[in-house]
Image (spheres, rainbow, N blue to C red):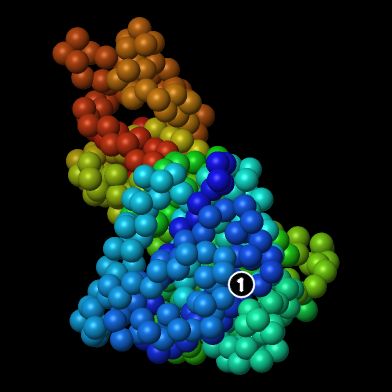
Amino acid sequence: MTGRKKLLIATVVWGDWYVGALVDCAVPSLLSPNNFPRLARDCDLEFLVMTRPAEQPRIESSPAIQLARKFMTVHVLPGLPPVIDSTVNVFNFHHMMWNFVYERAKREGSYVFNLSPDAVFADGAGTCWADLIARGQRAILWTFPRGLDTAMPILRDRYRTPDGAINISPRELVSLNLQHLHPLSKALQLDSPNFPNFPEMLLWPVPGEGLLMRILAGEPRVFNPSQVELTPQQIVAGTMDGCTFIDDSDVLYTMSLTPAGHNADWYKQPAKADSGKVGRWWLDFDSPTNDSVAARQICVHPGDRTEALWRARERRANLFVSRAAASREFLRVARAAFAADCTWVAALLTMIGRTTAGLRLFPGRMQTLIFGPTDAAIASLSIGELLKPAAAARLARLLRSHVVIDDRPELNLTERVHEAGGILRLRSLAGRELTVARRPDGWLMLDRFKLAHSQIRTRGHTFIPVDGVLDEDVGRALA
C-alpha cells in the first residue's frame, strides 16, 4: 500500500477506573464514523496498550477492543508490574512506552498518537487528522479542559450506537463538558479564588457561550517523531513550522474525564492568578515554541459565538499572558546573572519578575544584550530605594540603560566588535549611545568600564557582566 502513512497509537493504563474509562468511553468514542474508521481509510493503524497482567484479559475481551480490531491491529501488552503503589514513579511507565514507540516510529517513518485513557473524542477528529497528515503536517496539537467522570454514564447511555461506538458531535461534547466541568478547570479560571500552582491552562469564561483558553506549552498529540524534536517535558522544540494547532472546538474537541478529587492539592490553598508566579512556572517548561503556542486563542463553544464578547476576553487574556511572558524573561535573565556571579542584579531582576513592572519596562518580546553590573560595582548603591513606588521611573531608566536590542544574535559581542573593526557603537533602550572597544590586552571595554570575558547566552538574551553602572546620574543618586 504505497503512499499510505502509518499511525502508532500508544496508551499506558492500569487500575479499575482508568481501564473502565479506556474501554467504555475513550476507545468507543474513537470508533465513531469520522474518527478511527475514517482515518483507517488513509492510514494503517496499530494500537499498543501497555497494562498490568491482571488487567490484560478485561481489555482484550472488551467490546470496544473487539470492534477496534476491524480497523487496526491491536496489541495489549502486560508489561507493567503487577503491583503499582505510591512508592512508584508512575511517569516512568509513560516515558518507557513513549520512548519505545517514538524509536519504532522513527525507524518506520510513522506518526504517533499518545492516547490518554480518560480522553473522549467528538466525531470528526479522524477526518481532521487524516487531512492534516495527508498535507504533510509534522505535528497536530490541541488541548482541552477536564470534565468530571459524572459524564461517563451519559456518554454510555445517550450516545452509544448499536455497534458499541460513542458518537457525539463537537458541540454536544463541549456542552456536556461545561455541564460537568471539573473543579480543577474551574480553578484555572482567572477569577478563581483558588488558582492552581500548576497552571496547565488558563481559562476565561464567556458568559452563556463557552470558555476562552490559553496554554503556555505545546504538547503534540499526533506527530511524526522523525520530524519533531521534543523537550524532556514532551513539548515541541525548534519551531512550529509544519505543525497545526487546533484552536476551535468545532474542528476537533476532546474531553478529559477525571475523578472529582484528582489533583485537588493543586488548588486547595486560596490564591489569586499571579502573572509572576505563572511566569516562573512557565520557565520550568521552556521551549522556543512556547510563545507561538501561548498566542493562540482557543475557543471552546457549544454554539455560535458573539464576536464582541470573545474579543473582550481575548484582550484580557493577551494582557495576562504578556505579563507572564515578561516575568518569565526577567527570571530567565536573573538566572543568567546568578550564573555570572552578579547576585545583586539577579535578586533585583527576580523581584521585578514577580511584579507587573516588567511589561511596562519591556513591552515587547525581544532579543537583547544585557550588561549587568557586578556585585562590586553596585555594592555601595542603595538598591532597596529602587523598589519603592516613588522610584519606578528611576528604576525603569536604570534597567533600560543596560539593555540593547540584539540585531545580530548569530554573533557574540566579541565577534561583532571584531567585525566592526575594533569599535562597536550600540544604543541602549534608554537612548544612550554605548561604545564597545577592544583594548590591546584583549579586554573589551564598554565606555570606561571593563566587560567580563564570560558571555552567558540564554534563550533570546546574552548577559555580560560589566564593572560599572552605565547610568551615572542614577548611580550618583543611589550612592
Which residue is outermost to the left? 441
Is residue 111 or residue 468 the one in the foreground? 111
In depth, the one of 428 and 263 nearer the eye is 263
Q: Residue at x 78, y 79 (%)?
A: 208
- Toward the top, the furthest residue is 421
Q: Is residue 35 above or below residue 181?
A: above
* Callout 1 secondary element: loop
* Label 1 crowd (10 A; few <14 / some 14-19 / many >=20): many
State the image coordinates of residue 280 (x, y, percent, origin top left).
Answer: 39, 60
Q: Position of residue 72 (x, y in %)?
A: 52, 64
x 68%, y 58%: residue: 127
- Quadrant in the picture for residue 350: bottom left
User: For this view, does 306 lie left or right of residue 412?
Assistant: right
Amino acid type of disc 1? Leu
Residue on which disc 1 sits: 31
From this view, report whether residue 330 is shown above or below residue 28: above
Query: Residue 13, percent across and down?
Result: 38, 77
Closer to the camera in the image, 22 or 367: 22
Image quarter of the N terminus: top right
Q: Is residue 96 above or below residue 13?
A: above
Observer-nearest of 330 and 56:
56
For the point 28% across and 44% down, the residue is 337
Percent of width and height locating residue 112: 46, 56
Query: For the point 23% across and 45% down, which residue is it?
Result: 339
Image vertical order of residue 444 relative to residue 149, above or below:
above
Total numbered labels placed on residues in the image: 1
Q: If the image is split into quadrants, where does the C terminus sit?
A: top left
The reply to whether residue 391 is visible in this rendering is no
Quadrant of the image occupied by residue 48: bottom left
Q: Quick check: can you spot residue 55?
A: yes
